[in-house]
Amino acid sequence: MLHILLLILKIIGIIIAVILGILVLLVCVVLFVPVRYDMEAVSKGTFAKTCMKAKVTWLLHLVRVNLCYEDKVFSWQVRVGWKKIQSGQEEKKTIEAEVKTYDEEVDEDWEEELQQEPVSFGSGSEEAGKRHREVLEEEKGKPVKEPEEKREGSVEGLEEKQKVWGASGRDVRNSSKEPERLVDELEREMERVLEAEKDMEEEESADCKERQEDWEADQQEWKIVSEDSGEERETDYEGTEEEGTGIWQKAAGICQSIYQKIANLYRKIAGIPEKIGSTVEGLIQKVQGLLEKKDKIIEFLSDEIHQTAFMKSRDEVLFLLRRLKPGTIQADIRYGFDDPSLTGKVLAGLSMCYPFLGDDVDIHPDFEKRVFDGQLKIAGRLRASYFLKLLWKLVWSKEVRMTYRHVRNFEL
């Protein structure tokens, strides 16, 4: 019984060891298997004619990413194992789905047309109807019943002819009575014109009478006005006295408003020194606050622990950048802009990177014309262990941990 338990424990231990070994292997693969990248770019005189191809692979091309930019079109492709995803794939699926749905809709429309009753065509469109039926038969392979055409000797044709001839006969009968109607209408119009002339004469006579009455009334009013002119002069004199008093009141109001404006201006001028003093005091307080903050910041940065933490983090970051530097950089580029000053600024920025680019990089500026021509190739590899090493050293550094705590609790 004991040896059976030992055998079971042995099997369980082997299984656990295998699982742990697989986990360790996966961790090592993720940390130490590099991600390789390779990029090539070629330009033929202008920025629009630039072509670029890039490739990123990992774990013996098990994971692969391809990027391409050519003729102002960007495309990409991602492959993980046997699964592949690329640009434009979704558009193709949508187009195929739209084509399928369109075909289904067309088929449904044909079926509905075939199921409907046959449509009768007129004498002028008999050929079009036959062609339509022939197309339907070719599409579906089903015979279509021809509609019963209306013959000349059929009952329906005779009825239609009777209706047409009946309508034309009525028109002829009505046309024979047209002269009598025209004469009656002319007589009626003459009577209307005579009545209108009589109405106009009556209106003119009434207007003349009204004008005479108005003239007489105006004469009477002038007489009354001449009699009352003496009384109006007295009232005008009283009105002038009232207008004089109103002018003096307006002048007094204007003087009072001017006095109030002058008083308000004096108050504002008297309050200017107080405002200047308050603003100066506020500026002094702000300057004092800034000086205090500056002293706190200088004291924080001058601490030995913080300085050692800063030096360690700087060294680790520089070491990481050296590891991330591409293995091969080859370039032969000739560039230029319409503005020569812009060309010089770009050259000044590139000159700062010359020590890190290597001897295989040649850059030629052109200050006379706009041009972009040349070739570029960059290749290298990255490992996750580089970043893990940086974090490991920073976390296990006592000075870095203390500086991190002080930064979190720092307040100005």
Image: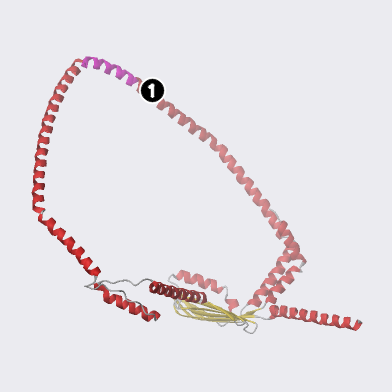
The residue furthest front is 155
The residue furthest right is 2
Q: Left of 286 or right of it: where is 346?
A: left
The residue sitting at 64% across, 76% down in the picture is: 324
Task: Provide residue 238's location: percent of width, then percent of height.
Answer: 30, 16
The residue sitting at 66% across, 49% down in the picture is: 289
Q: How many marks?
A: 1
Task: Provide residue 231's location: percent of width, then percent of height.
Answer: 24, 14
Task: Point out the stretch of residues depicted in magenta.
Answer: 228-244
Q: Which residue is mark 1?
A: 249
The relative height of residue 260 versus residue 345 in the rendered view (above or below) is above
Q: How is the image coloured?
A: secondary structure
Mark 1: amino acid: Gln
Helix or strand or loop: what does disc 1 sit on?
Answer: helix
Task: Provide residue 302's location: percent of width, then percent of height.
Answer: 72, 60
The relative height of residue 264 versus residue 346 in the rendered view (above or below) is above
- The quadrant holding residue 172 is bottom left
Task: Provide residue 170's location: percent of width, then percent of height.
Answer: 16, 58
